[in-house]
Image: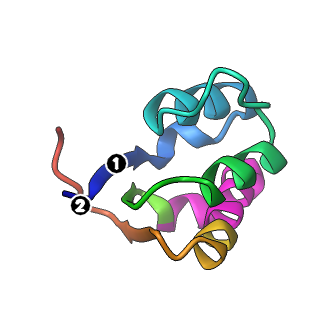
Amino acid sequence: MVKKYIIDCEKLSERRAAHRYLAETLEFPKYYGNNLDALFDCMTEKAECTILFKGAVELYKKGGYGARILEVMREAAAANPLLQMAMTENVPAQ
């Protein structure tokens, strides 16, 4: 069974909080560097999984750091064939 993660994009606006949230939600190793380069590295090493982004469209519209996170995630998905991403506005709660 493919692991599925749901990312609430409202939690990605502020840099430090965003990286804490991503590290916890995506089960990154303790040595995660809490920056965009480390995010890319961890995502390209991720085992097969699907990541659903709730509210990504609004986050892209706002721009800023959250939009940069989404761009890094998109680049990581292009580099890691085991990583599937979907951006949606309606993701059911877990």
Q: Main secondary structure of the magenta part?
A: helix
Q: In percent of the image, x 65 and y 41: which residue is there?
A: 13
Q: In percent of the image, x 49 and y 42: which residue is there?
A: 10
Q: Nearer the viewer, residue 36 or 14?
A: 36
Tell me residue 32's x, y (percent).
71, 30
Q: Quadrant of the C terminus?
A: top left
Residue 31 left/right relative to 20? right
Q: Is residue 8 above or below residue 18?
A: below
Q: At label 1, which amino acid type do we have?
A: Ile
The residue sitting at the top extreme is: 30
C-alpha gap between disc 2 and disc 1:
11 Å
Label 2 crowd bin: few (<14), some (14–19), many (20+), radius 10 Å = few
Q: Nearer the viewer, residue 53 or 31?
A: 31
What residue did someone put label 2 on?
A: 90
Identify the magenta region: 57-73
The secondary structure type at the circle numbered 2 is loop
Tell me residue 7's x, y (percent).
42, 47
Q: In percent of the image, x 23 and y 56: which residue is there?
A: 91
Label 1 crowd bin: few (<14), some (14–19), many (20+), radius 10 Å = some
Q: Nearer the viewer, residue 28 or 7?
A: 28
Q: Quadrant of the N terminus?
A: bottom left
Q: At label 2, which amino acid type do we have?
A: Asn
Residue 4 left/right relative to 24? left
Q: Is residue 4 magenta?
A: no
What residue did someone put label 1 on?
A: 6
